[in-house]
Image: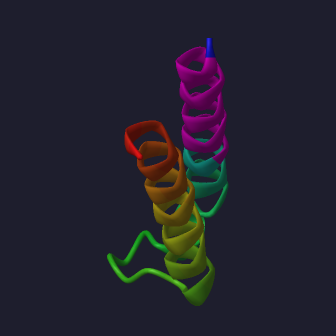
Amino acid sequence: MEYLLYAGLVLTVLIGSIGAMVATTKDTAGGYGTVGDGLLALVVLGFAILTIGTSVF
């Protein structure tokens, strides 16, 4: 049951991050990311590490 909760958390975060990236596409059209894109990537990575780490350990 816990794995379903973790999977739901991961999917929610990924969907949110994809939505945010689409919303900021106009800022990154030149191929250079903004500070917001970098922070968003760190947040997504942090959630992924937390989710995977807690399910493994």
23 or 29: nearer the viewer: 23
On the rendered image, what quadrant is the N terminus found in?
top right
Residue depicted at x 44% and y 80%: 33
Q: On screen, 56 above or below 32? A: above
Q: Does the magenta stretch include residue 51?
A: no
Q: Position of residue 53 (x, y in %)?
A: 43, 51
Q: Which of 18 and 52 is in front in this view?
A: 52
Q: Position of residue 48 (x, y in %)?
A: 47, 51
In the figure, is residue 22 to the left or right of 32? right
Residue 4 location (% of width, % of height)? 59, 16
Q: Which colour scheme is used?
A: rainbow
**Measuring 58% from the left and 79% from the top, which residue is drawn there?**
39
- Residue sitting at x 59%, y 50%: 17
Question: Which span of residues is magenta-colored?
Answer: 2-16
| Image quadrant where residue 23 sits | bottom right
Instruction: Point out residue 5 in the picture as x, y percentages from the top left corner.
Output: 66, 23
- In the rendered image of this protein, does residue 3 appear above or below residue 33? above
- Determine whether 15 is above or below 49 in the image: above
- Considering every residue shown, the one lying at the far front of the view is 57
Does residue 9 appear to the left or right of 45 in the view shown? right
- Residue 5 included in the magenta stretch of the image: yes
Image height of 28 relative to 47, above or below: below
Residue at (37% x, 41% y) in the render: 56
**What secondary structure is the magenta-colored segment mainly?**
helix
Q: Which residue lies furthest to the top in this view?
A: 1
Residue found at the very far left of the displayed protein: 31
Count up the numbered dots: 0
